[in-house]
């Protein structure tokens, strides 16, 4: 039985009326999960211990208990149960031990696990993901461990089996000098049928208003009031995107914030957090997140990243590396370039001239903000007559 099973409410009612009347191990496991999700941890643990008594040699029962302890930040108890799971022959226990100490930010406790994780990495793909994440977290990143972890994996296996962590792999490969392979894997991942679930994000971005409202209502009517329980990361990202597009920024930021700590190298999550921080005028945070997303391969964030810089109190020269990219599509980014030239200290005369080169006053006047920036630039350039002529045309133009 699952929590979504139509018969579950009856089972729950039976248990709450007479706990001893429920004896089936699987029914008890589902009940313990229910109470855990509703943060009734004592009840969940009590039922979990009953499950262990029924079959003390079942590794999944120890996994269940370990998850309960980890949620309560009882990390030592959690690790002990996951170790028992592994000792009983389930390699997934190693992943859960890693997860426990990762949650506790106790990287030192993970180090002794690495040899066993390497020995068992072919038994469970998630262990390889863990090793890659650990290798990249080290200071400096552990190149030897990274390549040991992915040894023997083809590009097709990486995109098919490790799709949730694909950005870790491409980032690591590029970092350690294999940029061509990183780009190849990224291109393969984008085309892979196995990545179809990520299309949910794109679908969410094209919802019309009524579809978006329906999606949000379904999400908010789920148990735990939409907490990210039993939902895939792409689904959560899709819902967060819907919230953002519907201008429910508080809900979008809250949901992106739940995803981000566990998926800090998922470009969709990083960009989502950055967009929300930009809306809330957290410009420094948005800049940091957009830079991280850029390092992960995002290339459609040039405008919002530049806007964050222009709105911040930072030295604008910190965005100077973006200028050549903006100039490649000058017509699209003319407002950004002009804003930069008139705000940066000192005034960037050469960039201003390059930005307005071969463009008529009429073209500048098509966008009033562009025209206003151009007037400021001509003033600073010393071309007062041109600035005044453009100012008069702007004032005479239709409101």
Image (tube, helix red, strand yellow):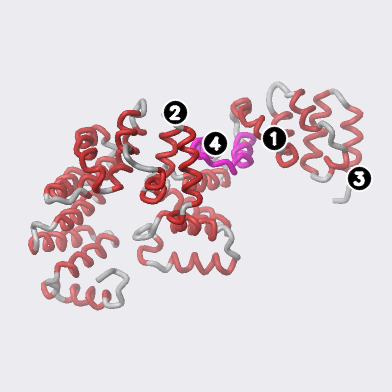
Pointer 2 local density, CA inside 10 Å: few below 14, some 14–19, many at least 20? few
Frontmost of labels 2 and 1 is 2
Earlier in the chain: of badge 4 and badge 1, it is 4
Magenta stretch, residue numbers: 285-310
Earlier in the chain: of badge 2 and badge 1, it is 2
Earlier in the chain: of badge 2 and badge 4, it is 2
Residue 128 coordinates in the image, percent (x, y): 30, 42
Label 2 element class: loop
- Report the residue marked by disc 4: 287
Choose top left, top right, bottom left or bottom right for residue 381.
top right
Pointer 1 local density, CA inside 10 Å: few below 14, some 14–19, many at least 20? few
Frontmost of labels 4 and 3 is 4
Pointer 4 local density, CA inside 10 Å: few below 14, some 14–19, many at least 20? many
Pointer 3 local density, CA inside 10 Å: few below 14, some 14–19, many at least 20? few
- Report the residue marked by disc 1: 328
Earlier in the chain: of badge 3 and badge 2, it is 2
Report, in whole angstroms, how far the alpha carbon at label 2 lies from the one at label 4: 26 Å
Cβ atoms at labels 3 and 2 below 8 Å apart: no
Total marks in image: 4
| Direction from residue 381 to residue 306 in the image, left or right | left
Report, in whole angstroms, how far the alpha carbon at label 4 lies from the one at label 3: 38 Å
């Amino acid at each position: 039985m699952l929590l979504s099973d139509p018969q579950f409410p009856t089972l729950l009612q039976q248990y709450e009326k007479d706990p001893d009347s429920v004896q089936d191990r699987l029914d008890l496991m589902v009940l313990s999960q229910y109470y855990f999700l509703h943060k009734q941890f004592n009840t969940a643990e009590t039922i979990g211990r009953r499950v262990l008594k029924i079959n003390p040699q079942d590794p999944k029962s120890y996994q269940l208990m370990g998850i309960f302890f980890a949620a309560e930040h009882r990390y030592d108890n959690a690790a002990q149960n996951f170790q028992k799971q592994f000792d009983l022959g389930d390699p997934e226990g190693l992943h859960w031990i890693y997860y426990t100490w990762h949650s506790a930010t106790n990287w030192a406790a993970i180090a002794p696990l690495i040899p066993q994780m390497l020995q068992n990495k072919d038994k469970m793909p998630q262990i390889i993901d863990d090793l890659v994440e650990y290798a990249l977290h080290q200071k400096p990143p552990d190149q030897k461990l990274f390549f040991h972890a992915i040894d023997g994996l083809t590009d097709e296996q990486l995109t098919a089996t490790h799709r949730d962590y694909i950005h870790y792999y491409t980032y690591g490969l590029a970092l350690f000098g294999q940029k061509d392979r990183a780009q190849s894997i990224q291109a393969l991942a984008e085309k892979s049928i196995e990545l179809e679930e990520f299309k949910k994000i794109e679908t969410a971005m094209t919802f019309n208003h009524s579809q978006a409202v329906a999606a949000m209502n379904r999400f908010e009517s789920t148990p735990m009031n939409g907490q990210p329980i039993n939902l895939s990361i792409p689904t959560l990202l899709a819902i967060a995107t819907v919230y953002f597009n519907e201008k429910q920024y508080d809900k979008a930021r809250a949901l992106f914030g739940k995803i981000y700590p566990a998926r800090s190298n998922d470009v969709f999550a990083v960009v989502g957090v950055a967009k929300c921080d930009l809306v809330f005028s957290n410009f420094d945070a948005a800049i940091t997140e957009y830079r991280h997303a850029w390092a992960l391969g995002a290339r459609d964030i040039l405008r919002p990243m530049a806007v964050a810089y222009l709105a911040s109190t930072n030295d604008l020269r910190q965005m100077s590396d973006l200028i050549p990219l903006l100039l490649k599509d000058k017509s699209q980014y003319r407002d950004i370039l002009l804003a930069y030239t008139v705000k940066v200290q000192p005034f960037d005369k050469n960039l201003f001239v390059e930005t307005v080169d071969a463009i008529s006053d009429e073209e500048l006047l098509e966008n009033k903000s562009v025209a206003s920036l151009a007037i400021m630039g001509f003033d600073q350039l010393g071309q007062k007559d041109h600035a005044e002529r453009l100012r008069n045309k702007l004032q005479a133009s239709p409101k």
